[in-house]
Amino acid sequence: MVFCISLLLIIASQKYKTYLFILLLLLLSIAQTYPLYFGMAVKGENIDDKYYDRIAKIGYEYKDVADKLNKDKSNNVSYVFTTPSVAYGVYSLNYKGTDHLVGQDLLPKLINKPFIYLSSSSGIDSNVSKQLFKVITDENYDELKKFPIEYIILRKDINCLDCPILTKENLDNNYLKILENNLFIVYKVNEFTPLINVKGSTLKYEMVSPVMFKVNLENIKNQAKLNLMLSFNKNWHIYLDKNDKTNKLLEKNLFNRTHKYANDYANSWIIDTNYIKQNFSKNNYTINKDGTLNFKVIVYYTPQNWYYFYAFISTFLLTVYLLILLRKHKDD
């Protein structure tokens, strides 16, 4: 859409013969597509003291929760779950009930961590939504640990008669309470399932963008199960991290035949160290004294490659069009 509008504006600019306008428009188009290119448009970014203060005056209770959770500076990605789980509704912005907000929940705008709600309309897979709904309805705290939920917020700023909720008594018995005020009680789930995990070994990972994770695998012996606790999708693939900038569209993915469901909703692969040793040079892995391997992989959502491809095509066509305009201008 932005590209089409840009072309229309370029055609209109011919009447004014101002090619500086064309250059500025090209820069504007690049700036518009930058968040999509790097995945930031999917993730979104929260900025302190911006935007939300223009639409609502929030009480200290909201700020207390945001300050507490935003102190968590760990690189690992985990989710926040609220109970009752309501993404859109009528919220009380202070304990007196004098100020209200009708619309989207403000907490995700204040807190840096992503939120998960009991609704497929909030962006999660319908299977995940159904499973989580059953877990919350049954208050099955053992099953709840299978999700990458690190914080649970028991909220009093909204009422939902039809929503399943986790009761305060059971939350107090199962999790660590880290904050309580007039509107919210925040609990920390210490034994939650990490977003990326491997059984029997250790790993460190970095989320480069919502479509790419860099994973450092250590002490892998023979075979190990690598789990990505996001909704199952066949387009998630694993690649060996060779520390180069080769586009994943040109590389062969690893262990795709072993890609199956984990916990009935997430992604799982079987990592085979023998395959790594047989198909890649020793520059791509290290062998420990006990025979285990250390190596790096990239977990990548491949449809992002098609955006790169069409972005290249669009840029190429726009460049050709600009050259034609310049040629025509010189001829005139």
Image: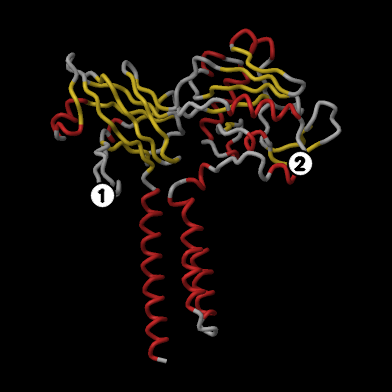
What's the residue at 48%, 26% (across, down)? Answer: 74
Is disc 2 surrounded by few (<14), some (14 to 19) or many (20+) residues within 10 Å? some
Q: Secondary structure at mark 2?
A: loop
The residue that label 2 is drawn on is: 56
Position in image of residue 283 (x %, y %): 17, 33
Q: Amino acid at mark 2?
A: Ala
The quarter of the picture where residue 226 lies is top left
- Relative to 315, residue 74 above or below: above
Q: Secondary structure at mark 1?
A: loop
What's the residue at 39%, 59% (across, down)? Answer: 310
Q: Residue farthest to the top? A: 173
Q: Which label's residue is closer to the chain start, 2 or 1? A: 2
The residue that label 1 is drawn on is: 250
Position in image of residue 321 (x %, y %): 40, 76
| Distance CA(mark 2)–CA(mark 1) | 48 Å
Q: Say left or right for 92 vs 266.
A: right
